[in-house]
Amino acid sequence: MWYFLLREHVHMSAQPVCGCRFCVWLTLLSVVVGKEVTGEHDKPNFVLMMVDDLGIGDVGCYGNDTIRTPNIDRLAQEGVKLTQHIAAAPLCTPSRTAFMTGRYALRSGMASPGRAQVILFLAGSGGLPPNETTFAKLLQKEGYTTGIVGKWHLGVNCEHRTDHCHLPNNHGFDYFYGLPFTYFKNCLPGEGTDVLADVQEALRDVTVLLGLAAVTLTAARIAGLLAVSPRLVAAPALLCLLALSVWYMPFQRLQTWNCIVMRNGDVVEQPLDSDALTGRLVDEAEGFLERHQHKPFLLFLSLAHVHTPLFRSKTFAGRSKHGLYGDNVEEVDWIIGRAVGAVEKLGLSNKTLMYFTSDHGGHIEDNERGGWNGIYRGGKAMGGWEGGIRVPGLFRWTGRLPAGRVIDEPTSLMDVFPTVVGLAGGELPTDRLVDGRDLLPLLEGRAERSEHEFMFHYCGTYLNAVRWRPPDGDTVFKAHLFTPNFFPEGAGGCHDIKICRCHGSFVTYHDPPLLFDLARDPSESTPLTPQSEPRYTEVLRRIAKATVEHRKTLTPVPSQMSWSKMLWRPWLQPCCGTFPFCSCSESKSMNL
């Protein structure tokens, strides 16, 4: 910009001008040049921080008095705390889809009707469709530099291992460093598996049985005990090899296939080094802020914590009163402190909106290694139960948002989309429905009520529950159309299968729906009845009507979560080196 002003000034200076006019142009030129050099700009920056599987009850400012989270608590003290902040889904992939797009995951085809509710293999072809609009795409159009450091879990490739159609770089992010999948049990030897454990066991058993059959028939033929044709001997042997390939290649090498680190489209570590990962993510986040401090930026810091198998950091080992899980939460707090400190060190606090949340509630079936969801019932993967979807929501913008403000209104992770886009000066897409609402009026205190009269809670592709905030009063009703079948009976989770499911015999449908008043019963312990709630019939009628209207807005889209897209394909597998001999470490991959 300053070049054109200089050119104009030179042109004008060739004409007879008064000294005063010359001084005005010189002053204007110095201001513009100064802004170009120092990087001054009027647009706010954004640092969005999301933890994986963190329970709302794990954080001090939400009631935990035994796990130390001073840096997270400081965000609440110096900013705005949302007490009814809701994830759009109780599992990673659909929740993060909704967060990135401001739309229910069902609208993108990122929800499943079956048992697999999240992406299982990096070498599957499903993922966030390239035609979806993320907030990062819209901010790029407004001149922002955008980056994501940490977990993605929204797919990688479509047709071959280098098309990267689902990666962050194809969804509006200029820079990506981190895990295209997630940190899960297979990443740490000896921790077991998170991916179709029963299927793996069945395939292993079939492989062993077919192998035994082939050996037995061969031995019997050699010993002359049976007149067995070579074809009959070969059949179980070939089937054994087929079963072995189906079992061993996708499942027994999951640490290599799924536990990788990428920088943009390049695999830089395979498998990942869990001991070094946290430090690298922090360094990358701080490096991004340092590099782009002079221009508007958005950083999505998507933590790999606190998903099991949990990290074993020596620095934080034994520091908390809650074992390894508590140590991990306190390490999360340290990471958040580093991010906040980096913003403050660069002098950007007054022009940076910082946001902290979790993608969904804690995984309570992991017992002492899972999160605590406070007073709320249920947890991860449990549909609409509050413990699986009510998450921390903290906003800090020094000098702009009132410090210590608490908002009890229903809000959603999807609201970040329109809030960020609006603040950046962008426009929301007009070719699709956006479910999120701009939070800025609530955050600043210019509005007292949420724009969400109704919120719809999905478990996979199934509408599980509906929340209604009537226009009058402080009541918040929630109706559960079905609930997961807990095991053992009376327990708070699905301890038999380790994670609840959304379909068939795994759920119980309710007619009429189970109805709760969250304002009086946030733990959802006592369903309302016509006797206990005078408006019982009216509430259910109003919710039913809203549900019909909501379903009219849904249009069929190709599923990204079908088995045909989920299963492992060797030609889609991200790999450093020559497939299938994929192996590299960060130090060897970087040009140091």
Image (cartoon, rainbow, N blue to C red):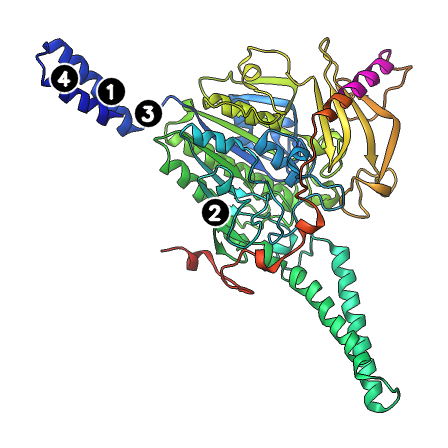
**Direction from residue 574 to residue 399 in the image, left or right:** left
Q: Is residue 482 magenta?
A: no
For label 2, count other residues whose C-alpha is less than 10 Å away and answer few (under 14), some (14-19) or many (20+).
Answer: few
Residues under numbered marks 1 and 3 in contact, where contact means CB atoms less than 8 Å apart: no
Which disc number belongs to residue 279?
Answer: 2
* Three-letter code, disc 3: Glu
- Is residue 576 shown above or below 388? below
Residue that badge 3 annotates: 40
Amino acid type at circle 2 is Gly
With respect to residue 213, does 451 lie above or below? Answer: above
Label 2 or label 1, whichever comes before in sequence order:
1
Give me the C-alpha separation between circle 3 and circle 2.
30 Å
Q: In the rendering, at what x and y percent does residue 120 appear?
A: 66, 50
Residue in the image at 71% along x and 50% along y: 563
Circle 2 sits in a helix, a strand or a loop, which is it?
helix
Going from N to C along the chain, the mark reached first, 2 or 4, is 4
- SS class, disc 3: loop
Magenta part of the chain: 534-546
Q: Secondary structure at mark 1?
A: helix
Say whether residue 7 is left or right of residue 397: left
Upstream in sequence: badge 3 or badge 4: 4
